Amino acid sequence: SFAKFESHAVTMFEVGKLSDESLDSFLVELEKVQSTGEGEAQRYFDHALTLRNTILFLRHNKDLVAQVSQAEQPTNGFPLDLLRCESLLGLDPATCSRVLNKNYTLLVSMAPLTNEIRPTSSCTPQHIGPAIPEVSSVWFKLYIYHITGQGPPSLLLSKGTRLRKLPVVFQGYDRLLITSWGHDPGVVPTSNVLSMLNDALTHSAVLIQVRR
């Protein structure tokens, strides 16, 4: 239910983590999330499904602890905590390192990070990840489209550009994905996008993409 999800979210925000003991309840709630097949609700479902599958794979997985000495290795793999990156970044580096080394054997970063959040880096305990925020950047998107020869119709406009009408390549679509420089993207109906674009372009460069 929403109330139970809200309870987990409050715990994550206030405490900075969801402990292994609370994950059974959290997984039950993730299992109840239904696919809608459209819009932001579908994106929410996809994220919930990915998170659930990731937790199920990492939690108590014997194969992930094969390199740990036998004396330290639990018989059924390691428990799992979900940590809030922003809470770790609120600690000074020495304290953060001490907390991580005391409590954890392995760190796995979830991706992608947003442009506003810097990754937590660590040599010990072993750290798988993180994907740097630049992976979500406009430049990296364009690079991937270039080397793969695939990707949605896209147009990068420099700051100060003024549009009199929507470019032809976007006129046959109902929604566009708009990314202002240094911010996360947002979906905007094509019918309302022109004034929004011109306003955004007074402050920064903007990437326009088809949202299928």
Image: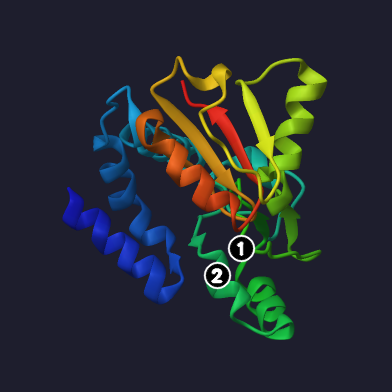
Q: Position of residue 198 (x, y in %)?
A: 52, 46
Which coloring applies here?
rainbow
Q: Position of residue 94 (x, y in %)?
A: 74, 84
Residue count near mark 1 (Cα–Cα under 10 Å), binned few <14, some 14–19, many ≥20: few
Amino acid type shown at disc 1: Ile
Please give the name of the residue rendered at 56% of the width and 41% of the height, measured from the top-left corner: 61
Q: Mark 1 points at which residue?
A: 117
Q: Of helix, strand and loop, which one carries label 1?
A: loop
**Residue 185 in sight in this render:** no
Residue count near mark 2 (Cα–Cα under 10 Å), binned few <14, some 14–19, many ≥20: some
Nearest-to-viewer mark from 1 and 2? 1
Q: Mark 2 points at which residue?
A: 86
Q: Position of residue 188 (x, y in %)?
A: 41, 37
Near-viewer residue (84 or 182): 182
Q: In which quarter of the image is residue 116?
A: bottom right
Relative to 1, say whether 3 is above or below: below
Left/right placement of residue 91 relative to residue 18 reads: right
Amino acid type shown at disc 2: Glu
Near-viewer residue (168 or 125): 168
**Residue 145 in sight in this render:** yes
Please give the name of the residue rendered at 50% of the width and 52% of the height, measured from the top-left corner: 199
Name the disc covering residue 66, or none.
none
Q: Position of residue 147 (x, y in %)?
A: 82, 22
Lower sequence index among marks 1 and 2: 2
Q: Do the residues labelled 1 and 2 touch (CB within 8 Å)?
A: yes
Relative to 104, say whether 165 is above or below: above
Please give the name of the residue rendered at 59% of the width and 80% of the height, measured from the top-left corner: 90
| Gap between marks 1 and 2 measured at Cα | 7 Å
Q: Quadrant of residue 58?
A: top right
Q: Of helix, strand and loop, which one carries label 2?
A: helix
Relative to 185, say whether 15 is above or below: below
Left/right placement of residue 207 relative to residue 146 reads: left
